[in-house]
Amino acid sequence: MNVNINPYNRLTGEVLYRPYIDNSNYINQKYYVKKVYYGPYIKTVVLPLECINSFGKGNSTGIKNTGENETKLLNSRVRSQRNCIQKAIHNFNGCQNLGFTTLTYAENMQDVKQANHQFKLFIKKIKYHFSKYKKNKYENLKYLVAYEYQKRGAVHFHIIFSEYTPNKIIRKYWPYGLNKNLPVKKGTNEFVSKYVAKYVVKAYSQEKWKNNYDLNTKAYRFSANCTDPVVKVGIIEMCEMELIASLKGTKHNFMFNNKDGYLMGVSIDSDWNKDYFWIK
């Protein structure tokens, strides 16, 4: 799929800043472009196509992760948090009646598999409770749940619900301990999504997470009806100066350099309507 350099605000029609570049003075090369569309945002990663093709083939560019196990584990945690935040924003950013709930145990529950089983029953009971109503706004209830350990070792859950659930319903179907259940103010959905998503990395890094109860258990889970961000990939031919120009005016970006310090690629987070590289 081809990528166009078509930098304008797709919401207002305003042309974004793009300097004149005389391509005759520079050497063009092919770049791989990956775009992740999540909620109102886009993450764009641009890397030389030859680097992508060489991954797994003794790549000498220095981009591929060839570090020790601890480094790879840290990178995995960072990717997990990033993917969780993107998916959370993608699914909950547009909700008008978001709910944030914390479920705890009165007893010192440390078996996360048993706790997860009880959480699944809790969700089923809530859905069944509201299924008896003709106007059931909970029929397509979405959630993101992340578990964490308290200082005493007990498991507790942090949850984002796409619909705020009344306290009496939470108390009725979660009899194991106290709960904190709050409606989310309009305009703060993204903050709450990031707040819950941070427990993904926190759970991975906790020492107690390494106990036998946690084997093969993910630190977070989305409901089955949550959708993944849209991913598009393409190829573009341009010079290095055009790559540098794409960073103009961006607030959140990262530059990939090779071992000699030369710019190889970029990673840019932007609003969907201010997209420098456009994939139709």
Image (cartoon, helix red, strand yellow):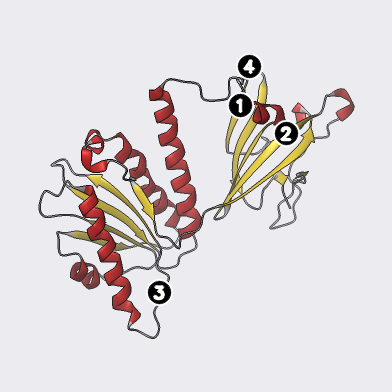
> Does the residue at mark 4 contact the one at mark 3 (Cβ under 8 Å)?
no
Q: How far apart are marks 2 and 4 (CA)?
A: 18 Å
Residue extending farthest bottom: 134
Circle 3: element type: loop
Number of numbered callouts drawn: 4
57 to 132, vertically: above or below: above
Quarter of the figure with residue 144? bottom left
Query: In this rendering, does residue 188 appear at all?
Result: no
Residue 31: image tag: 2
First in sequence: mark 1 vs mark 4: 1
Residue 256: image tag: 1
The residue carrying mark 4 is 261
Q: In this view, does 74 lie to the left or right of 41?
A: left
Q: How far apart are marks 4 and 3 (CA)?
A: 54 Å
Q: Residue at x 67, y 30 (%)?
A: 53
In front of the other: 96 or 66: 66
Q: Which residue is drawn at 23% across and 48% down?
A: 112
Quarter of the figure with residue 250? top right
User: x and y percent of residue 121 in the render?
Assistant: 26, 65
First in sequence: mark 1 vs mark 2: 2
The residue carrying mark 3 is 139
